[in-house]
Amino acid sequence: MWRHIVSNFLTVLIVVLVGLGAAAAWAKRQYNGPGPLTQAICLRVEPGASLTRVSNRLAEQGAISAGYIFRAGADYAGKAGSLKFGSYLIPAGASMASIIDTITAGGPSSCGTEVNFRIGVTGTDVILRELDPATGAYAEKVKFIPSADPAPEAYLQESVKPDTRLRVTLAEGATSWQVVEALKQADFLTGTISDIPAEGTLAPDSYDITRDAERATILAEMARRQALILSDLWAARAEGLPYATPEQALVMASIVEKETGVPEERRRVASVFVNRLIKGMRLQTDPAVIYGVTRGQGVLGRGLRQSELKRETPYNTYLIDGLPPTPIANPGRASIEAALNPDTTEFLYFVADGTGGHAFAATLDEHNRNVARWRAIEAERARQPQGN
């Protein structure tokens, strides 16, 4: 009899253990496998929020199948007490494990409201925008120019929230003076800037910023990135280039940056100036002459005068041989690549072609014909009624 009882007990125990094992395997698949979310969402984790509260919100939004599995998995992974406040983009099909990783890793918010402080060649503006998680696109809520407009109330309210993402975006071709003057206007930054960084040494890029970050720290990060880009691309440069140092290549890159806004043209434009240097011809590039006039402090806003083309400055490439002494702007990575790996061409000249790009020529006669076509286009445009 006792043997029968023990046998039955062992049978039940085995069944229970098998059941528990199957349940554990099922829970593991639920935790690590694709989740039920069919469309991306933005999850806001508030300061001091509990894991239970977050799991309930995720369940309500259809991101997880079972809150208790989510909490148990987080506890097993040792992350139950490591929630970081912020707004996080949860993609469709995200597993519970990946959601836990996202909301415990910290860092800038990846969705919700963002302030983008944009430093451009012709000015600086601020955009307050919000990410639509379903489409991945930002919807603009407020836009203003900090040097001319008072900050809108919506900006003042949203920008101070702890999970609002703050970003500084530096456009290719802005000068170091423009960058410094712009950063002085960013109300979410602190500290003074003692010196203007050397021209060309700041990397055009997008920078995630924390509130009250030091302006000098941001400039240092911009300089660090540019130095790394230049070092990497210099090591992979083409042979036979007329540059003795990476700094000279940076000067060329800045000229390429200012000469064309068409990405496909950068290497071709670089080839023209490389060919000119090799042949001992003067570069004759207007953007360098303009830099000699403005010293990078603002935009000229008009064409060059004959007196300026004849004025002797270290940047007047109609009068000096070789490269100017410094870059004339902060070039982006693509322009540095173009300067260090230009196209192989025989081109020595280029002029605008009326489409936003340029017509290139290997001979002066061909160039003169291209110039005549451009003059005709200009004349025709001048005859057009304004507004057409």
Image: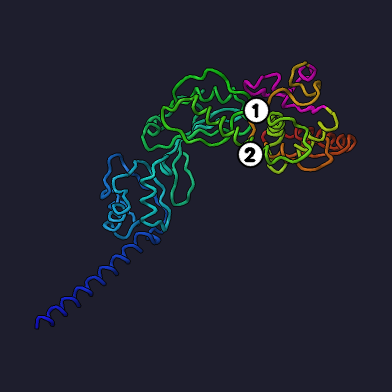
Quarter of the rendering occupied by the C terminus: top right
Q: Is residue 299 visible?
A: yes
Determine which residue is flagged by label 2.
232
- Please name the residue that numbered disc 1 is placed on: 329
Q: At 30% across and 54% down in the image, what residue appears?
A: 76
Which residue is depicted at the point 77% across and 42% down? 343
- Measure the alpha-carbon separation of dots 2 and 1: 20 Å
Q: Amino acid at mark 1?
A: Ala
In the displayed structure image, the side of residue 310 where residue 257 appears, left or right: left
Magenta stretch holds residue 346: no
Mark closer to the observer (2, 1):
2
In the rendered structure, the answer to whether residue 10 lies left or right of residue 268 reads left
Q: Which mark is residue 239?
A: none
User: Which range of residues does the magenta coloring cover?
Assistant: 282-310
Residue 344 at x, y = what percent? 80, 43
Q: Amino acid at mark 2?
A: Asp
Instruction: Report the front residue among 27 and 374.
Output: 27
Q: Secondary structure at mark 1?
A: loop
Residue 255 sits in quarter? top right
Pointer 2 or 1: first along the chain? 2
